[in-house]
Amino acid sequence: MASNPDIHSPSHIHPQLTVAVSLKMYFSLLQTTNYIQSCTALAPLALSRHIDLIIIPDFLSLSSASTTIQLYAPTIRIGAQDCFWEDRGAYTGEVSPASLHELGCSVVELGHAERRRLFGEGDAMVARKAQAAERNGLMPLVCVGERQRGSLEGALGECRAQVESVLAVTRGEVIFAYEPVWAIGMEVPADPEYVVDVAKGLRALCGERKVRFLYGGSAGPGTFGKMKEEVDGLFLGRFAHDAQALGEIIGEVGSGFLGGSDQ
């Protein structure tokens, strides 16, 4: 693991381009069912554009969502919004990563700013969950980001601990969603040049590890094209809670792959 990231090093070769969307707790069960059904129509587009499409519904909808995806759009991946760090035991209210894998999940979102703020989750807890996820065949999608808007050095310093704590306990591929906390829910995303520099600096920390860096934080149309030099895709929120809008983003992120059909 490199100790001194060079943010001015040449751009990397992109790993798998990725579009992920979390539904948080916005939808009813019926709304989620309808949304998932609409998203199945996006599978051919995502496949033709070489996009790893990940949809992360609420826990109560996971079973039906997983069944629908497996039947009608198996190239789409289903993820969970959190998991516990133990597989089984007397942990009332928690969700087993082993059970998530049984259910058909292949990704689990961890360390979102809301969980860090509302539930006191720190880097050590997120790392334990990432380790448990990997142990059970789930790819960790770990949210990282600085709390206050400031300097590039300050952002890298705060995010470094978040990234390194996860890398220290995992061995496989990890997706990092860079979401500056101050940009979440704002009308416009963070400055693209700033995001590129942060992503480049964090990627340098990862050395030879296989990682993906997504950008989240008010991401929408036009976001990816301005930061694709260092960002491997987008982690979307409310904008993509409409399947048609999600399709537009998939087309934008995968615009370099024009050989396939968009239908």
Image (tube, rainbow, N blue to C red):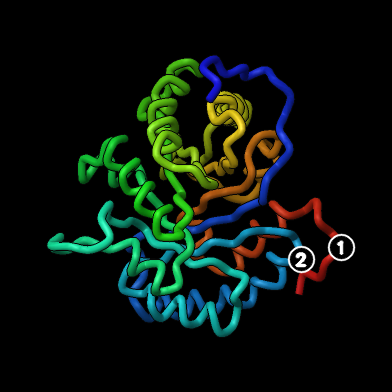
Q: Which residue is label 1 attached to?
A: 259
Q: Is residue 164 left or right of residue 15?
A: left
Q: Residue at x 71, y 66 (%)?
A: 47
Question: Which amino acid, by three-letter code, is at mark 1?
Answer: Gly
Q: Secondary structure at mark 2?
A: helix
Residue 61 location, quadrant: bottom left
Q: Would you say residue 123 is visible in this rendering?
A: yes
Picture layout, residue 185 above or below residue 6: below
Question: Which amino acid, by three-letter code, is at mark 2?
Answer: Ser
* Residue placed most toward the observer, 102 or 107: 102
Q: Is residue 184 left or right of residue 236?
A: left
Residue 31 location, quadrant: bottom left
Q: Are marks 1 and 2 in contact (CB under 8 Å)?
A: yes
Q: Position of residue 190 (x, y in %)?
A: 53, 33
Count of labels shown?
2
> Upstream in the sequence, badge 1 or badge 2?
2
Q: Secondary structure at mark 1?
A: loop
Q: Residue at x 57, y 48 (%)?
A: 234
Q: Residue at x 67, y 58 (%)?
A: 51
Q: Would you say residue 182 is visible in this rendering?
A: no
Q: Residue furthest right?
A: 259
Q: Position of residue 163 (x, y in %)?
A: 44, 33
Q: Residue at x 42, y 20 (%)?
A: 157
Q: Which residue is label 2 attached to?
A: 48
Q: Which mark is residue 204?
A: none
* Residue placed most toward the observer, 130 or 11: 130
**Badge 1: few (under 14), some or many (20 or more) residues near its Cα, within 10 Å?**
few
